[in-house]
Image: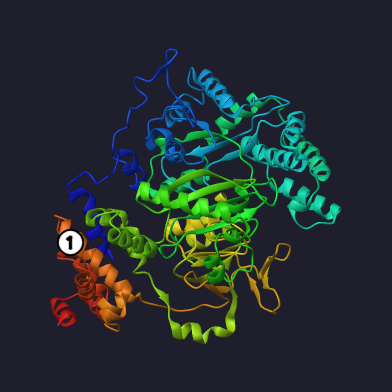
Amino acid sequence: FVAPAARLRVRGALLPTHPRPSTTAAQSAVAEPPDTNTKETGISVGNVVNGFERYVFSFGDGCDTPPLDKNLLGGKGKGVSEMADMGLPVPPGFVITTEACKYYRNNKRAMPEGLDMQVEAAMKVLERQMNAQFGSIDNPLLVAVRSGARVSMPGMMETVLNLGLNDEAVEGFARQTNNRRLAYDSYRRFITMYSNVVEHVNPRIFEKELEKMKEEQGVTQDVDLSADALKELCQRFKALKLKATGTPFPDDPREQLVRAIRAVFDSWDSERAGAYRRFHGYPDDWGTAVVIMTMVFGNKGDDSATGVGFTRDPSTGEKRFYGEFLPNAQGEDVVAGIRTPQPVNELQAVRSGSDLPTLEKTMPEAYKQLMETAQKLETHFRDMQDLEFTIDKGRLFMLQTRTGKRTGLAAINIAFDMLNEGLIDEKELIMRIEPEQLVQLLAPVFDPQEKKRASPHLAARGLNAGPGAASGVAVFSTEKAVEMKAKGVKCVLVREETSPEDFSGMVAAEGVLTMRGGSTSHAAVVARGIGKPCVCGCGSLRYNREENFVRVEGTGMVLREGDPISIDGTTGEVYFAELHTTPSEVLQVLIDKTKLPEESKTFQQFNTIMTLADKYRRLRVHANADTGRDAEVARALGAQGIGLTRTEHMFMDKERLTDVRKMLFSETEQHRKEAVA
């Protein structure tokens, strides 16, 4: 597949640069992938606060708009600052720039001089905006501390919510909101996240205690725990943290904040973040910004919710809002995949077969506002957006917007639709489609006859979160997936839900299957970003940890580690069997000649993209081809010549190999002539 990828890849070096119509530099920064060859912006130069370089920028009511540069503010910081500048409902806050993280990393984890004063000053601005006080017992201001690199790295770095609570402030928060359950639910979440992110305590110890409490109270859902039960749970969590670390949970909100900022900086150098950067080719020296925002609460009751969504379908590219939400929850609940979320609208519910209540039905006003906001953002940034939102007692707040990750199929469909809508031109269409996304169109698919043959082995159906076919042996851990990859064995990673620590396993596997979580969960977002087939939310599957097998509810079907499994990320089907694949429609048209061009929309789009790439490029594309078959395939895929031929590879054909060996080991000239005759 060298020819099509190369024909698309030469676009950036060859297209002349032209200003885009009605596009500011800030908009271009979001719409375009990062250019690793550009110099640092240097925007902070000349910005001095009390004699120190400026590292902190506030956003929200009454604040000047920060420099809208994602290299400085990070993608998240730029997104929330720009949304605030647009007048959209964004909780106020401030951004600590990537320059501060770079200083921290280059100076043995020392904070830049003057940063503490700038953070304190920004917090004073936030206190005035919210009419609350950080560290107050009676009127506490609570904040979220989030990471935000210049590119989207979903789940790879850290977040801490509800920061500012302690045993006294939680009572003040309960009085402030007249909601004791909310206060103690937020406090137990904060203890868990802080202990995990800042002090690296295994979150499973808190999950086990939570399950134990639910058993004691005779309930099955977190939301059914009473305020008194949650208060008791907070004390148990603090005792678990003390036992795990040897130090008590910190009561001083300012200590909590400083250590949380450090933890976010440190998360840039975590193993999973490093693996993600290496996979995508991002430099290690970029660093991350830190976004500190006023907390809004999706866990106040049935009139509150949290959710994520895309302005278009990230799997297919269809022009319809695609999102998921959880009522009475906080943001991490959705992306973690711990609970299977509910569809945002009725159309999505019908298509996914979900009978859960939708946001469109349960909170129609908030849903309407969300749709209007999504349209504004897509029009403003001229690209499909990935949104995070919270509904606090019926009031919508936007927490994030960024260019959404999408499959190759979706990237192509979105680019063509936006071309037809007048949002982009032909040159930008080419730039919007990555070569790796184009290659996804050439990946094999399951043969329909194979699926028919394997129908007795159809075990389950889930959400079609990442299109494509994947087949191999089942593995139940990231470590096993990496091990199988090293051995050259194809595998499918099967998990209850994935976490950011599973990134290396997802890269090693042919595809990913999860039992919980939706199409906006961590597994789905990451799989789409790296081009892996993915099926999520397979609720009929149950994992037995003790005996290490998966069973299908209501049937006798069982899957053990090492058994064959196949997943179809386009349909959501899961087979406990190995299915053979067939070439993609593009190759069926160009190479096998088994399908006509007019019979395949996929081929027609592929051909149009290649035609546009050829229209604007100025380099010729030559292929590496060692055999006649290689040359035939390269020519069919658009190569204009052969750039490298290794003649020795021609002799590796099975029919020729014996003759070549005879020639090489012949002892006389006559024997040599006979061998090559």
Q: Mark 1 highlights which residue?
A: 614
- Residue 505 or 191: which is nearer the viewer? 191
Identify the residue at the far front of this view: 365
Query: In the image, 395: left or right of 371?
Result: right
Quarter in which the N terminus is drawn? bottom left
Occupied quadrant, residue 585: bottom left
| Residue under the point 81% across and 56% down | 219
Residue 269 location in percent, x, y?
50, 38
Residue 207 at x, y = what percent? Answer: 73, 49
Q: Which amino acid does label 1 sit on?
A: Asp
Q: Is residue 276 left or right of residue 601?
A: right
Local crowd size for mark 1, using a 10 Å CA cut-off: few (<14), some (14–19), many (≥20):
some
Q: Can residue 322 be seen in this view?
A: yes
Residue 408: % across, % down: 37, 62
Quarter of the image for the C terminus: give it: bottom left
Vertical side of 457 occupied by 114: above or below: above
In front of the other: 177 or 527: 177
The colour scheme of the drawn protein is: rainbow
Nearer to us in this view, 497 or 376:
376
Residue 146 % position (x, y): 54, 38
Position of 419 with respect to 675 (left or right) is: right
